Image: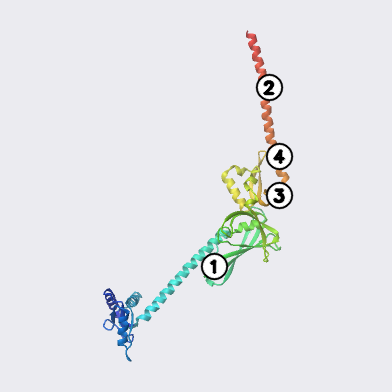
Amino acid sequence: MTINIADAEMLSSYAEEMASYGHRYAAFSPDQITDSDTIEFFRTSFDAQEYCFVMTNDVDYFKSMPIELLIGDLKILMQSGIDISCNEALDLTAFARLEREKKELLENNLNINIMNQKNLEYLKDQLKYTGFGETFEAELKENMQRGDKDFKIIHNGIMNNGVPNKDTLTVELNFKKSDQTDMYFFNSYHVNLQKEENKPGLEQTFYINKDSSSITLKEAYNLMEGRSINKDLKTKEGELYNVWLKMDFKEAADSNGNFKLSHYHQNYGYDLQASLEKHSIKELNTPKYKEDLLSSLKKGNLQSVTFVIGGVESKQYVEANPQFKTLNVYDVNFQRINHRESKEEKKSESENQSVSKEQKKNIDADSDSSEPENKKNNKKSKSHSI
C-alpha cells in the first residue's frame, strides 16, 4: 500500500473508526496512492476478496488486508520519528516491514547481550567459588566475544601453605562453547605444580561439576601434595554421600596421565574428630577453634595447632590421614613425629594422671592414719575427767 505521508494520521483515525463499526478487512489498489477516498472496508474476508475480484481488470489490480494490520503499519510509521507532515509518497507496507525487522534485530541483539552478560557472570562465579578469585572478567569477555569453539586462560600462582618453601602453580583454565547454544562452560583446569626449579612439575587435570562438589584450587594443591580432602559428592542417581579423596601417585587413572583418586567412603570408618581427640590439642577446648580446625583439615590443609604436654605448650602441625584412620603430626621443622612419640605423649599424660592419683591416695591415707590417734587422745582425756 502506497500512501501520502501527510495523510497517515487521518487514515489511521479513519481505519480505527471503521474497525469500531465491525469492519475487519480493507481493500485498495496498490498501484495508486491510497487515501480515505480510495480505500474500502468490509466485515468479512469473503466480501473483501469479492470486491477485489470485481474491481481488478487489465489496468487496475486490487488486494485486501486485515484492518488490524493496516492500523499497525500506520502506527509504526507515526512512531518511527519520520516527519508525517511532508507530502511524500511512501510504500507503507514495505516501510513497516523494515521497521519490524529492525526492532526484532535490536531485541535479538539485546537478548544476546543479556544472555552473554548472564553467561559471563555465571563463569565469574564458577571461577570465584573454585578458588581462582575475581580477576578474569576482561579475559573472559574478550574470549567470549571472539566466539571460538573453546578457549584457555592461563593462571599463575604461589602456594606456600604456611611453610617456608614456595610452590609455583601454573594452571590452564579450559572453557568450551555449547553445541546447542552460544553459552560457554568452565569444564576443567589443568595444574602444573613446580616444587623445584629446572625440574618437571607434577601435573593433574581436575574437572568441574555442575554442583558445589568441584575440587577447588587449594584442595587440588593439597591433593598433589599427598594430603587428603573431604567432599560431599553425588551418585549418578543424585544421592549425596561423603568421601575422603587421596591421590594415588602409583596408579594412572587415564591415558592423559592423570593420577587416580582413591576414595575412602563414610562407611570406611574414619573419624577425624576422634583422631584429633587422641592428642592433647588446645584448640579442641574452644568450640569455634575446634570447628575451624575440623573444616581446615577436611580441605586437606596442613594445620598449625597447639599441643599441651605436661602443662607445656608447643606449636605443631597436623593433617588428616583417612587411609590409616589416624592423624599425621609434624614438629615446627615439618618433620614427621612418629607413632612411638605419640604413644610417649599419651604415656606422659597417663603418668601425670597416675602421679596425681598417687598423691591423692597418700593424702587420704595420711588422713585415715591420723584419725585413730585423735580418737585415742579423746578417750584418754575422758578417763582423766572421771
User: Residue 305: x percent and y percent?
Assistant: 63, 46
Between the residue at mark 4 and the residue at mark 2, the CA separation in whole angstroms equals 32 Å
User: Residue 233: x percent and y percent?
Assistant: 59, 56
Q: Which residue is mark 3?
A: 336
Above or below, 361 relative to 29? above
Give the amino acid at mark 2: Ser
Residue at (68, 25) in percent of width and height: 365
Quarter of image, res 156: bottom right
Give the amino acid at mark 3: Arg
User: Is residue 159 or residue 17 the one in the foreground?
Assistant: 17
Give the amino acid at mark 4: Lys
Quarter of the N terminus within the rendering: bottom left
Q: Are marks 3 and 1 in contact (CB under 8 Å)?
A: no
Tell which circle, 3 or 1, labels the residue nearer the N-terminal end: 1
Within-10-Å neighbours for mark 3: few <14, some 14–19, many 20+? few
Quarter of image, res 219: bottom right
Q: Which residue is mark 4?
A: 347
Q: Secondary structure at mark 2?
A: helix
Above or below, 77 relative to 172? below
Tell which circle, 1 or 4, labels the residue nearer the N-terminal end: 1
Q: Which residue is mark 1?
A: 184
User: Residue 321: x percent and y percent?
Assistant: 67, 51
Q: Which residue is mark 2?
A: 369
Within-10-Å neighbours for mark 4: few <14, some 14–19, many 20+? few
Above or below, 209 relative to 375? below
